[in-house]
């Protein structure tokens, strides 16, 4: 599998993210080892469809006042309890995802744009620490340009949430790819009208333990 790295609009960027994530995961052998293929039991497909309809999985926050029967998860997306990857650990030295996702949006002729609150505007062009799961943008063991998300990829071809649950990172020091949470520190910027549809960016980032 190969992915051509060219500037793309947001749908293309997300496709490239998913493609490169799949490439790196498969290349490093980080995907789950399931063993030989087995024949599904009779009726398994129908039961899976019924279960999915009964318990939908969130990919972004619910709007205010939405129904409460859908699992709320944690952070900006839904971290499945069946995930082999543990949720982000509690840390007091990082910006909580709840702060980043607490925003509204407006629709213009150019698309859907973020409306940042005072707390988010106050972080603009300041040094911040962000914790998240790495989505690589290059098929290499170390990354200088990647995305951090509030929840891990649910599969090698899926993005885990909307732009409010992602931070683009441009690292000064290469960061090794890992399925475990990554923490970086750098200059934080809010993006009111980014060409790729992203809301947040950290530049000159360095990894933090």
Image (cartoon, rainbow, N blue to C red):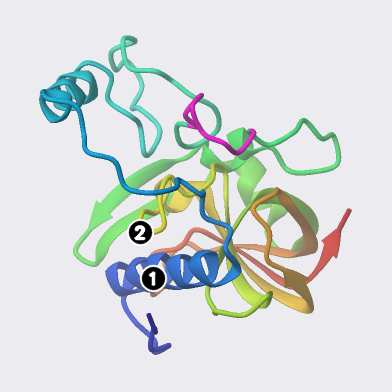
Residue drawn at x 66%, y 41% is 119
Q: Is residue 133 above or below residue 9?
A: above
Residue underneath mark 2: 157
Image-quadrant location for residue 197: bottom left
Residue closer to the observer: 37 or 136: 37
Upstream in the sequence, badge 1 or badge 2? 1
Q: Is residue 13 left or right of residue 42?
A: right
The total number of labels drawn is 2
Q: Which mark is residue 19?
A: 1
Q: Position of residue 163 (x, y in %)?
A: 44, 53
Image-quadrant location for residue 9: bottom left
Q: Is residue 36 left or right of residue 24?
A: left
Q: Position of residue 59 (x, y in %)?
A: 36, 39
Whether the residues at callouts 1 and 2 have beta carbons within 8 Å, the answer is yes
Is residue 85 on the magenta stretch? yes
The span picked out in magenta is 79-86
Classified by dominant secondary structure, the portion drawn in magenta counts as loop
Q: Is residue 195 above or below residue 121?
A: below
> Is disc 1 placed on a helix, strand or loop?
helix
Residue closer to the observer: 168 or 118: 168
């Amino acid at each position: 599998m190969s992915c051509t790295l060219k500037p793309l609009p947001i749908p293309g960027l997300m496709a490239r993210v998913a493609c490169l994530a799949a490439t790196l995961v498969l290349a490093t052998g980080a995907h789950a080892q399931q063993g030989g293929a087995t024949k599904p039991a009779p009726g398994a497909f129908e039961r899976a469809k019924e279960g999915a309809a009964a318990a939908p999985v969130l990919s972004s926050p619910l709007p205010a006042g939405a129904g409460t029967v859908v699992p709320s998860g944690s952070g900006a997306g839904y971290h499945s309890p069946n995930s082999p990857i543990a949720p982000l650990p509690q840390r007091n030295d990082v910006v909580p995802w709840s702060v980043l996702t607490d925003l509204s949006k407006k629709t213009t002729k150019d698309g859907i744009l973020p409306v940042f609150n005072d707390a988010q505007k106050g972080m603009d062009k300041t040094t911040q620490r962000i914790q998240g799961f790495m989505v690589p943008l290059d098929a290499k063991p170390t990354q200088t340009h990647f995305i951090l998300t509030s929840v891990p990829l649910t599969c090698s071809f899926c993005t885990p949430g909307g732009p409010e649950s992602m931070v683009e990172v441009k690292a000064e020091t290469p960061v090794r790819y890992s399925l475990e949470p990554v923490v970086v520190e750098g200059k934080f910027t809010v993006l009111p009208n980014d060409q790729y549809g992203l809301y947040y960016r950290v530049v000159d980032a360095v990894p933090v333990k």
